[in-house]
């Protein structure tokens, strides 16, 4: 298929592009490079420098004719969304509506969307399945939930078929070492720990150690980015061939605390990684773990790289490789 990957120069997007290419799809990347990196682009793919807030950019892109598109262009810092909701409204919601309008105008009706476990909020039961009540605790999660609703309406009104993939905590790097472009100003736990390990930050801040969990820190379900990439391609092929939409949770079902992640990172890297335990952050549920039984049943998908050692080891190798090539 001819696939437009919006946000394809980003961290998750570049891994999705690599997987699409490995399965024989023709890829064009659309990105404004606000957080995506030139380094993450593959020279054999076309690249469109464009912005989802400029409808004319999207119009020109979709006019080229695509069988499908994958939408990964969003701001994603849950904490920031609680203090700058307007930024998330404009980019995540308005930007997505621009995409939906341009895609459907050009009859590109197969869409894969990077949704989030943040749509659920504080769990009412664990592990979280697809039917769990949706009550986001942060504004970022609210934007993702609204976009899922927009897609359902565009299915009814415009014939769009979509796969909404609710990631739990994406982490890790390409195990083959081809992709190692580092996120700028990361807010997620593992890259922040790596920046501390490599002396780019003084110490890690752990938000809250008084949660009702086994060591007082938040529990999250970490899913390797390469496992996520495989799920995107399987979901795309499913909706294109079956002509039916999908909403799936993508996680491992295994929860790990922030402190456990920190201790494992110290063990694997051999680095000290100083950490301070500070106040809780608004919008952080105590525990999030998924069941991905539906993804397994529907797509035959199972995580392969999402054990703790591969998550941390692949990230450490990416940082080591990047910094060895970019010595100041």
Image (cartoon, rainbow, N blue to C red):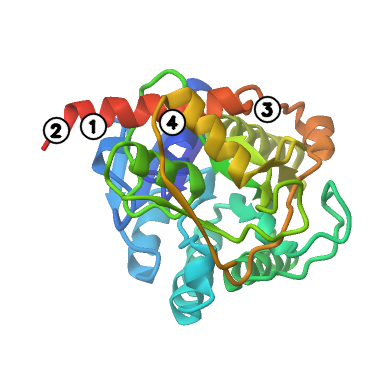
**Between 275 and 44, the one nearer to me in the picture:** 275
Q: Quadrant of the C terminus?
A: top left
The residue at 46%/62% (across/down) is 75
Q: Position of residue 180 (x, y in %)?
A: 34, 31
| Residue 65 falls left or right of residue 246 | left
Mark toward the viewer: 2 or 3 = 2
Per the model, the C-alpha gap separating discs 2 and 3 is 34 Å
Per the model, the C-alpha gap separating discs 1 and 3 is 28 Å
* Neighbour tally class for label 1: few under 14, some 14-19, many 20 plus, Cα within 10 Å: few
Mark toward the viewer: 3 or 4 = 4
Label 4: which secondary element: helix
For mark 2, what is the residue?
Answer: 327
For mark 1, what is the residue?
Answer: 323
Answer with mark 1 or mark 3, whichever residue precedes in sequence: 3
Mark toward the viewer: 1 or 3 = 1
For mark 3, what is the residue?
Answer: 303
For mark 4, what is the residue?
Answer: 315
Answer with mark 2 or mark 4, whichever residue precedes in sequence: 4
Label 3: which secondary element: loop
Residue 34 visible in image: yes
Determine which quarter of the picture holds residue 137. bottom right
| Residue 27 falls left or right of residue 170 | left
Label 1: which secondary element: helix
């Amino acid at each position: 298929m001819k696939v437009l990957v919006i946000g394809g120069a980003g961290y998750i997007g570049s891994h999705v592009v690599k997987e699409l290419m490995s399965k024989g799809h023709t890829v064009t990347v659309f990105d404004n490079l606000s957080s995506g990196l030139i380094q993450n682009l593959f020279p054999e793919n076309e690249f469109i420098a464009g912005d989802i807030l400029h409808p004319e950019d999207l119009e020109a892109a979709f006019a080229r004719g695509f069988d499908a598109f994958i939408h990964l262009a969003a701001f994603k810092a849950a904490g920031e969304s609680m203090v700058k909701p307007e930024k998330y409204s404009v980019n995540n919601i308005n930007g997505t509506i621009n995409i939906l309008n341009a895609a459907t105008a050009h009859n590109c009706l197969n869409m894969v969307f990077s949704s989030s476990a943040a749509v659920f909020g504080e769990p009412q039961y664990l592990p979280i399945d697809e039917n769990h009540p949706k009550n986001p605790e942060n504004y970022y999660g609210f934007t993702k939930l609204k976009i899922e609703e927009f897609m359902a309406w565009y299915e009814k009104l415009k014939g769009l078929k979509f796969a909404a993939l609710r990631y739990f905590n994406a982490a890790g790097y390409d195990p083959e070492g081809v992709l190692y472009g580092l996120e700028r100003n990361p807010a997620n736990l593992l890259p922040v720990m790596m920046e501390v390990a490599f002396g780019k930050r003084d110490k890690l801040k752990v938000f809250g150690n008084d949660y009702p969990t086994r060591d007082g820190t938040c529990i999250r379900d970490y899913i390797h980015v390469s496992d996520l990439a495989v799920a995107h391609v399987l979901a795309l092929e499913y909706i294109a061939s079956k002509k039916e939409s999908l909403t799936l949770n993508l996680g491992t079902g295994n929860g790990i605390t922030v402190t456990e992640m920190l201790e494992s990172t110290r063990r694997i890297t051999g680095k000290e990684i100083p950490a301070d335990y500070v106040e809780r952050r608004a919008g952080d549920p105590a525990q999030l773990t998924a069941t991905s039984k539906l993804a397994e049943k529907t797509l035959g998908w199972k995580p392969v790289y999402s054990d703790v050692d591969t998550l941390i080891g692949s990230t450490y190798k990416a940082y080591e490789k990047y910094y060895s090539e970019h010595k100041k």
